[in-house]
Amino acid sequence: MSDQHAHFKAHLDEEAATLALGAALARALAPGLTIYLHGDLGAGKTALTRALLHAAGHVGTVKSPTYTLSEPYQVQLDGRAVGVIHFDLYRMGSAEEFLDAGFREDFNGDNICIVEWPEKAEGVLPPADIDLYLSVAGTGRDVELQASTALGTSCLQRLKFAPKL
């Protein structure tokens, strides 16, 4: 992945592979990272985020923020406490709700922000470092990660994941 914008594509043949990708992504995280999760309902966005958070050291329940819109977590990355904020904007009525809730302040150089349904806040949501696309494919899922910044590219370059074939 030496190109300017790293790219990763794989087929995940079972849920365990989706969870393994979440765990691998946790090991490649960096403070300040913004990840957009794209995919239909049931594509595995929350399951992947849950696996990522547990692999990053969160102990306890990882709730889907469907009704709260955001759930904050604290994890340790390289011995440093880092906030991970999981957003689910599915129920948001307008992009202005995102601004009114003060969520934009969470996107800073310290927090890692993971956003489900980013299109609901299009135009006001800070740009993604990585766009992650999940789609149901047979009994598994297809996944594609596309970096759009240097921070996203460095994260994908650190990603060590090889789905079993």
Image: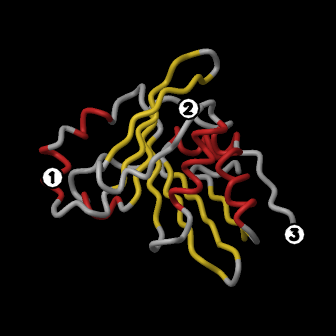
Pointer 2 or 3: first along the chain? 2
Residue 11 percent coordinates (x, y): 72, 71
- Secondary structure beneath dot 3 equals loop
> Dot 3 corresponds to which residue?
165
> Dot 2 corresponds to which residue?
30
Q: Nearer the viewer, residue 83 or 58?
A: 58
Q: Quadrant of residue 60?
A: top right
> Dot 1 corresponds to which residue?
97
Q: Is residue 12 above or below residue 97?
A: below
Query: Cα distance, mark 3 to mark 1?
Result: 43 Å
- Secondary structure beneath dot 2 equals loop
Q: Residue placed at 74% from the left, 60% from the top?
A: 17
106 relative to 62 in the view: left or right: left
Query: Cα distance, mark 2 to mark 1?
Result: 28 Å
Pointer 2 or 1: first along the chain? 2
Which image quarter holds the C terminus?
bottom right
Query: Cα distance, mark 2 to mark 3?
Result: 29 Å
Q: Residue placed at 62% from the left, 15% from the top?
A: 79
Is the residue under label 3 in contact with that under label 2 (CB below 8 Å)?
no
Comparing marks 2 and 1, which lies closer to the viewer?
Answer: 1
Which residue reaches farthest right?
165
Pointer 3 or 1: first along the chain? 1
Residue 49 percent coordinates (x, y): 54, 50
> Which amino acid lies under the numbered mark 3 shown in the image of this protein?
Leu
Which residue reaches farthest top?
79
18 relative to 35 in the view: left or right: right
- Secondary structure beneath dot 1 equals helix
84 relative to 143 in the view: left or right: left
Which residue reaches farthest bottom?
138
